[in-house]
Image (cartoon, rainbow, N blue to C red):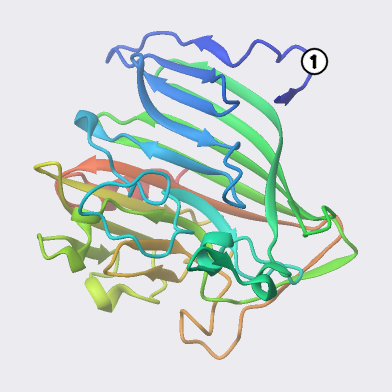
Amino acid sequence: MINCKPGLTLLLALVAMTSTQGAEFSIDQEKSGDIAIHIDGQLFTRYVTTDTVTNKCYFWPVIGPGGVKMTRAYPMQDIKGEKQDHPHHRSVCFGLQNAGGFNTWHEALTFTKNGKVDPSRMSTSGRQVHTKVIKAKTSGMSATLVVECSNVNPRGEIYMRQTRKVNFHVSDNGSRVMDIEILLKGIQDNITIHGKKDSGLTVRVAHSMCVDAGLGGRIVNSNGDTNDGAWGKRCEWVDFNGPVEGKTMGVAILNHPDSFRHPTPWHVRKYGLFTANPFALKEVAGEKDRGDVQLSKGQTIMLRHRIIFHEGDEKKSGIAAAWQEYARK
């Protein structure tokens, strides 16, 4: 059951005002306890908090313009033709390979072989536990969801807390947008967020969009680097575009100037992984500093990104201009 502040008990069944473009948002708590965001009565995405197989909260599915499914379904669902690797890449999610000695990037499925989980790997497995909805509001052509989750160790002890604020809206060109702010707060006297390669805000794009699928997928960043050349670079944004369900579609992640260590290094791979990782300065960006961060009790780190699900490539959808507009906020 979701724990809401006084006066917020009924806020998860809201009907938004209708915008001039006719985009009507609603936020609804489903019977499962997950939280669904709808546009004009159709599912845009779902914030999944009740999946007992994984160790993280995530958004899936994500439905882009024209009803196109923008992220990989595996491991939540088996789809013929999808590449089934890295089961911890759950659509849109956030994880840290090593914070306080615990891992919320990889999960039990990562370490499962022939139906058996490697117990030695699970001793350092952390978990993101959804604790409450702070805010769920719709207004005009947007919706805002603010939630809290605790990072806990295998003994259930909290070592870090996350506040996640997500604003959903539809842009003038029809792109569907998620503005994501993640506030990391230290709970113990002191923990280290290690500069590991597998950490950060992640999108696992639809398989057909991947460069490795050989169907025309492409990675490009704000520096003009493409495909393999985009990996590890510090830049303002990265766009992954290619064919999905017969259309050219794309996913862009923009890094806000106020975000921790902007411009972030990007752990983006041709097989479909797409991660903004400001921690792995050595492992991803190739810099001398490892990028470890000490997070003392009460100290916070803010990560700010905009994810744009769009039609066409980065030029047709105006991603460079979109970053300029986002950077002014």
Q: Is 317 placed above or below 115 here?
A: above
Q: Identify the residue shown where x is 68% and y is 64%.
A: 125
Quadrant in the picture for residue 65:
top left
User: What residue lies at 76% left-to-right and 69% top-to-bottom?
Assistant: 100
Q: Where is residue 195 in the image (x, y as percent from the top left)?
A: 61, 77
Q: Nearer the viewer, residue 255 or 226?
A: 226
Which amino acid type is shown beneath numbered disc 1?
A: Pro
The residue indicated by pointer 1 is 6
Q: Which of 12 and 32 is in front in this view?
A: 32
Using the image as rendered, state which of residue 227 and residue 61 is in the foreground. Answer: 61
Q: Can you say whether 251 is above or below 119 in the image?
A: above
Determine crowd level at label 1: few under 14, some 14-19, many 20+ residues with C-alpha closer than 10 A: few
Q: Position of residue 227 (x, y in %)?
A: 23, 72
For the N terminus, give its image quadrant.
top right
Left/right of residue 327 with respect to residue 293 in the rendered view: left
**Farthest residue, direction right:** 189
Write down the quadrant of residue 218 in the picture: bottom left
Q: Where is residue 102 in the image (x, y as percent from the top left)?
A: 71, 67
In the displayed structure, would residue 178 be above or below residue 38?
A: below
Q: In which quarter of the image is residue 81?
A: bottom left
The image shows residue 190 at horizontal and vertical percentages of 85, 68
Q: Is residue 173 visible to the viewer in this orientation of the structure?
A: no
Which residue is located at x 65 percent, y 66 percent? 103
Relative horizontal placement of residue 41, taking residue 144 as reference (left or right): left
143 over 257 or under it: above or below: above
Q: How many labels does the image show?
A: 1
Extreme residue in the bottom direction: 288
Circle 1 SS class? loop
The answer to whether residue 108 is visible is: yes
Report the residue at 32% width, 70% height from top.
269
